Amino acid sequence: MTDSTLPTQRPAEDITAALVLADGTVFWGYGFGREGDAVGEVCFNTSMTGYQEILTDPSYAGQIITFTFPHVGNVGTNIEDMERDTAASRGLVIREDITEPANFRAVKHLNDWCAAMGLVGIAGIDTRKLTRHIRDNGAPNGVVVYNKDGKFDIAALLKQAEDWPGLKGMDLAKEVTCKENREWTGARWTIAHGYAELKDPKAHVVAVDYGAKDNILRCLAATGARVTVVPATASFDEIMALKPDGIFLSNGPGDPAATGEYALPVIHKLIETGLPIFGICLGHQLLALAFGGKTYKMHQGHRGANHPVQDLRSGKVEITSMNHGFSVDGDSLPSNVKISHISLFDRTVCGIECTDKPIFSVQQHPEASPGPQDSFYLFEDFMDLIQKHKNAA
């Protein structure tokens, strides 16, 4: 788009924010959260609840999230609905102005929470139009900017969006992984008692943290697993020195092929141990790569809490939570790796299992934070594999 056709003038005097896409499309609105700008891939999430979990999910590193549900922020924020201590996403786009929180668990207004988390927000735009734009053209690079004085250099912001390299080829796991080993014993949450603590563990799971959500670790603990979380760059020897009964490969952001440059040599060796291995999201994609498969960048990705997935083994359909922009190429998988689950939206691969080793993985998020709990059985399946392996040893 030339400078002469680039919309540089805000349409109203009270405008304080803009979203500038790399193709020259500009959306105007009202800023909240942190003043300033943030660049990233603009995606959309169709979930009706759980915005706080979504914004703190490390898998959203490098992304600006558009919420298709118009009322975001109406239940405020609290200290329990966090997937990490900080937000990994770079910004957010919403339709309606944020109302005062109306929930007994709320401790902070979303605007104040976003400011504390360093998130740049824009409200008041036509999120349906933006979502259609993403569906038609793919997830674009963009810049969200909030200035209380209403002054914007749109040409400079457009160049910033154009120059950002995009998620393809980008390793972001190193940005969100833990820096050192940590022990995890917290289990699942109930409204009566909050988060439970693991008692009498049945097995020891080492979780490789490519951007793990805390609620995934809680679900592992809820099955009886004492979990040791290790950084994404942990070596095979460092992992095995912990004497694991099973290995978990976590979710995370970025291009799995880029993360695989240092992760795959370790996963190859872990596969050869014969230990049970379970992967979710990025961990699923990395397992597929380790078996010789391929991954590819999706047109718009899957992000929401109502995605139908079919278990091909039983024929059962599960409603699942998803958040991914890359997918496994099913035709690239070797003969000893079978597709176990598929998306009923577009037939993409949502689960694989190894026929000669106790290894499986899924693309969806069975921890359901936010989302339905149809797939929680996968954590139990993993623990069953661990127990069988221990009994056979």
Image (spheres, helix red, strand yellow):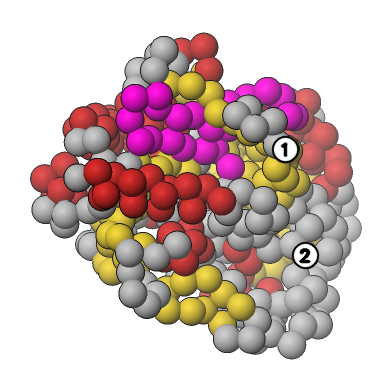
Q: Answer left or right for 181 relative to 192.
A: left
**In percent of the image, x 30 and y 60: which residue is there?**
203
User: Tag 2's secondary structure?
Assistant: loop
The disc, 2 or 1, on the residue closer to the chain's N-terminal end is 2
The one nearer the camera, 222 or 33, is 222
Indicate the position of residue 2 as horizontal and vertical percent values: 71, 26
The one nearer the camera, 380 or 392, is 392
Between marks 2 and 1, how big is the CA–CA gap? Answer: 29 Å
Indicate the position of residue 155 as horizontal and vertical percent values: 64, 39
- Characterize the local packing of mark 1: few (<14), some (14-19) or many (20 or more) Cα atoms within 10 angstroms: some
Q: Amino acid at mark 2?
A: Val
Magenta segment range?
Answer: 343-364
Q: Answer left or right for 270 relative to 96.
A: left
Q: Label 1: which residue?
A: 317
Q: Label 2: which residue?
A: 72
Which image quadrant: the C terminus?
Answer: top left
Indicate the position of residue 165 as horizontal and vertical percent values: 47, 32
Indicate the position of residue 113 as horizontal and vertical percent values: 61, 75
